[in-house]
Image (cartoon, rainbow, N blue to C red):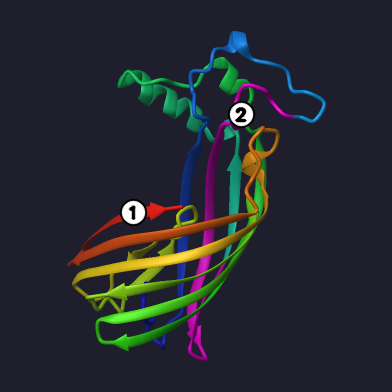
Amino acid sequence: MSRTLPRREALNELRLFSQIIAPSDLSRNPDRSHARDETGLTEDIDRDYVGHLSIGLHRHFQAGGLAYNFGVDASLLGPQTGLMGLQQKVHSEIDQPFPSDFVKNTQVSNQFILGTLTEVARPIALSPSTNIRSFVEVQTGVEDLIRIGVDAGFFGDLSEALFARAPVSGQRYSVIDGTGEGFLLSAGVDLTRVIGSMFLTGSALRASKYRACARFGLNYVHGRWSQFHWLDLS
């Protein structure tokens, strides 16, 4: 939710990301599994399990009153990430359901995917403590999509901080806290047009063409420490 970046600087961000996307029933009984039919869909499961790891390099800068983020990300999908094994160990320790053989056998296969991200935003300061930021984002790779929306920040001045957008929720959180200190309340809405998704290949669940999201967040920065709390509605 940054109002501005220091005009003299362009900043590079090394981004590490991981996520697990799981079906609603991790412990699906393998005896009830069905082979994929001629359309490639799997019966009796709402989606395939996905393990996703990525590393990316993003460059943030401002020019002509606009803020830019250009990035390239390399992603791994499937069993090669080791995330299913990690989840199984954690869930077994805390006595929670863990992936069954059926879920293991129907997970998204090993893939290596290169992707890009381009975001162009127009930050506008309405007052020393209030700003709005309209944006357009285009993403290719594990998901191909176009996202448009607006973010607003209230009751705080973290103008020297660098904020990044979470890939899944669209929330903006501080990655460089700058010299500001205090609270920043944020809110945002966006509409996403989904063109394609590698997360849903072969599952009975299809990606919705459009996703609408409203979000609220609270950033707190004190010295070298920061916290971020949020709520998403989609």
Q: Residue furthest bottom?
A: 64
Q: Which residues are magenta?
A: 41-70
Q: Choose between 137 and 8: the one closer to the eye.
A: 137
The N terminus lies in quadrant = bottom left
User: For the point 64% across and 25% down, which residue is it?
Assistant: 106
Where's residue 189, x and y in %? 45, 65
Q: Residue furthest right?
A: 38
The type of residue carrying mark 2 is Gln
Does the magenta-highlighted stretch encompass residue 64? yes
Where's residue 90, x and y in %? 36, 26
Q: Choose between 103 and 150: the one closer to the eye.
A: 150
Rendering quarter of residue 105: top right
The type of residue carrying mark 1 is Leu
For label 1, the SS is strand
User: For the point 69% across and 38% down, which residue is it?
Assistant: 201
Q: Residue furthest top?
A: 31
Label the magenta part by its dominant secondary structure.
strand
**Vertical position of residue 144 compared to residue 120: above or below:** above
User: For the point 69% across and 25% down, which residue is it?
Assistant: 42
**Vertical position of residue 200 compared to residue 173: above or below:** above
The circle on residue 107 is: 2
**Vertical position of residue 2 compared to residue 73: above or below:** below
Which residue has dot 1 on it? Answer: 231
Give neighbour class at mark 1: few <14, some 14-19, many 20+ (Cα, 10 Å): few
The circle on residue 214 is: none
For label 2, the SS is loop
Give neighbour class at mark 2: few <14, some 14-19, many 20+ (Cα, 10 Å): many
Where's residue 92, x and y in %? 36, 18
**Left or right of residue 127: residue 200:** right
Where's residue 33, x and y in %? 64, 15
N-term-proximal mark, 2 vs 1: 2
